[in-house]
């Protein structure tokens, strides 16, 4: 369910943040438009010899603070507006984390499960061929997002190297370790969110033995469930695109992971002792301490926000709560840790990968974890302090935090760059 247009809703957060700070209105105006949006049709040969076309986009939203950075999504419902909105969120996210990047995002409109592995590889390579002049280690650096993974990033990096005639690992992050990927990128999105919740636990009123609900059981959701369970918390409900299950005493996360590894759904656990099948709306309304949306945008909207019975929402997904839902949740005292902070662990370790590729020297997993923890805690604490000082939500505080950094960079560039478009 959509409460309005996605991009309009996303941009309205800028206006909300601007109400609480002194900021040149030109900065807000500058951030309302994407710098560059490219659309192509990718035609590939299918295994049966026929040809098929797929729409694809790449958006470089804002590069004031550095090369644009953001994932590539393969999804049947992808649209140009969604790509632009996701690229806007990346701009704010990279500023929140003080990474030397702007924001970008890409997508191909398809259900990758309908393609064979060889077709998927041809499509991934076609994407890089089409966007080879848009992307680059100093221009625009893709990474994985929904329904893309390290294997796809590996094919894309290989295609870029073929086009350039030399290896260029820093063009893309989230690669297989064998091709210059970073240790710790696979679980970084969840781990960053986990460090954040752990650091702010006292302020959030959270403690040991929490009841947690995870919506979406892919890269972000699976690792989050695993980390929470390993720390003694109870995962009382989970879902994926094919269904949802609940268990009062806590779901067996290892069994859920095994089901997903076999290509099945979490819903296939229903019927085992204590586990019952529930609807998506029941999942949202499950009483819990921590609700973790880790699927897609607009999952908590004006129609179901009033049913939420969580203390805290940790947005591992991008844009899972609509602005209207935010107001309802705020009124009911539910704290939302916003996407541009909560899921920023992924892009932060992507940044570490890019740095390691450029210096040709690779860090240990302990190094990666320590650096990620330090940044999540530093930015999380600053945003929490802004929220307290200005009596605003953590989301508005995060936008205030990001806007301060973006405004400085926009002003430092001068008017030449400012109006270059
Ligand atoms: N992978 C990453 O590094 C990052 C991902 N994110 C965001 O996290 C979210 C999830 O991304 P990934 O885990 O990477 O994707 P993924 O492709 O690994 O997993 C997506 C999961 O969502 C489920 N899903 C899809 N539609 C659903 C629905 N209607 N209800 C319940 N579940 C549904 C799928 O079944 C799958 O389990 C997205 O919003 C993405 O943009 C944010 C930051 C980084
Ligand atoms: O790892 C990255 O560069 C970007 C990840 C991403 O797409 C996101 O944070 O939404």
Image: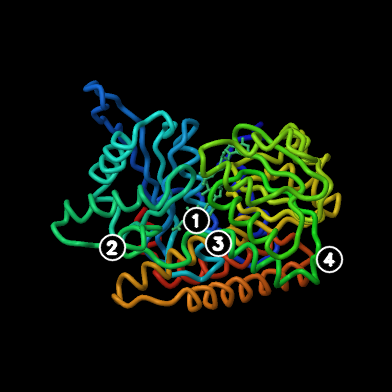
SS for tag 1?
helix
| Residue occupied by mark 4 | 205
Q: State the residue lying farthest toward the right.
A: 332
Q: In which quarter of the image is the N terminus?
A: top right
For the residues labelled 1 and 3, the Cα–Cα distance comes to: 9 Å
Depth check, mark 1 against mark 3: the one in front is 3
Reply above or below: 301 against 251: above
- The response on whether ligand 1 sits within 8 Å of label 4 is no
Q: Residue at x 31, y 70 (%)?
A: 357
- The response on whether ligand 2 sits within 8 Å of label 1 is yes
SS for tag 3?
loop
Residue 309: in sight, yes or no? no
| Residue occupied by mark 1 | 90
Residue 344 numbered tag: 3
Q: State the residue lying farthest toward the left.
A: 165
- The response on whether ligand 2 sits within 8 Å of label 3 is yes
The tag earlier along the polypeptide, 1 or 4, is: 1
Mark 1 nearby-residue class (10 Å; few <14, some 14–19, many ≥20):
many
């Amino acid at each position: 369910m959509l409460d309005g247009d996605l991009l309009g809703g996303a941009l309205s957060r800028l206006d909300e943040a601007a109400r609480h700070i002194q900021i040149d209105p030109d900065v807000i105006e500058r951030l309302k438009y994407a710098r560059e949006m490219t659309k192509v049709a990718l035609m590939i040969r299918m295994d049966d010899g026929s040809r098929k076309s797929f729409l694809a986009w790449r958006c470089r939203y804002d590069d004031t603070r550095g090369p644009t950075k953001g994932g590539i999504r393969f999804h049947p419902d992808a649209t140009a507006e969604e790509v632009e909105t996701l690229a806007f969120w990346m701009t704010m996210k990279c500023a929140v984390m003080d990474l030397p990047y702007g924001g970008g995002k890409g997508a191909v409109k398809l259900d990758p499960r309908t393609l064979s592995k060889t077709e998927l590889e041809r499509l991934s390579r076609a994407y890089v061929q089409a966007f080879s002049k848009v992307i680059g280690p100093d221009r625009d650096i893709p990474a994985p997002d929904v329904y893309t993974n390290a294997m796809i990033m590996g094919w894309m990096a290989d295609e870029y190297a073929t086009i350039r005639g030399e290896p260029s690992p820093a063009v893309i992050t989230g690669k297989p370790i064998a091709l210059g990927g970073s240790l710790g990128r696979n679980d970084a999105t969840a781990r960053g969110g986990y460090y954040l919740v752990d650091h702010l636990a006292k302020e959030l009123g959270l403690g040991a033995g929490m009841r947690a609900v995870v919506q979406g059981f892919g890269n972000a959701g699976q690792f989050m469930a695993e980390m929470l369970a390993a720390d003694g918390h109870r995962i009382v409900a989970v879902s994926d695109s094919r269904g949802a299950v609940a268990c009062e005493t806590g779901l067996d996360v290892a069994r859920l992971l095994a089901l997903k590894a076999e290509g099945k759904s979490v819903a296939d656990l229903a019927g085992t002792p204590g586990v019952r099948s529930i609807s998506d709306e029941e999942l949202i309304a499950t009483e819990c301490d921590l609700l973790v949306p880790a699927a897609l945008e607009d999952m908590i909207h004006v129609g179901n926000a009033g049913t939420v019975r969580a203390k805290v929402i940790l947005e591992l997904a991008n844009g899972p709560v609509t602005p209207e839902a935010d107001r309802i949740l705020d009124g009911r005292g539910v704290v939302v840790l916003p996407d541009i902070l909560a899921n920023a662990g992924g892009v932060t370790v992507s940044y570490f990968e890019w740095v390691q590729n450029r210096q040709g020297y690779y860090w240990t997993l302990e190094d990666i974890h320590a650096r990620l923890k330090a940044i999540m805690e530093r930015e999380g604490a600053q945003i929490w302090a802004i929220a307290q000082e200005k009596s605003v939500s953590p989301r508005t505080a995060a936008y205030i935090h990001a806007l301060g950094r973006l405004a400085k960079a926009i002003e430092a560039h001068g008017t030449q760059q400012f109006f270059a478009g």
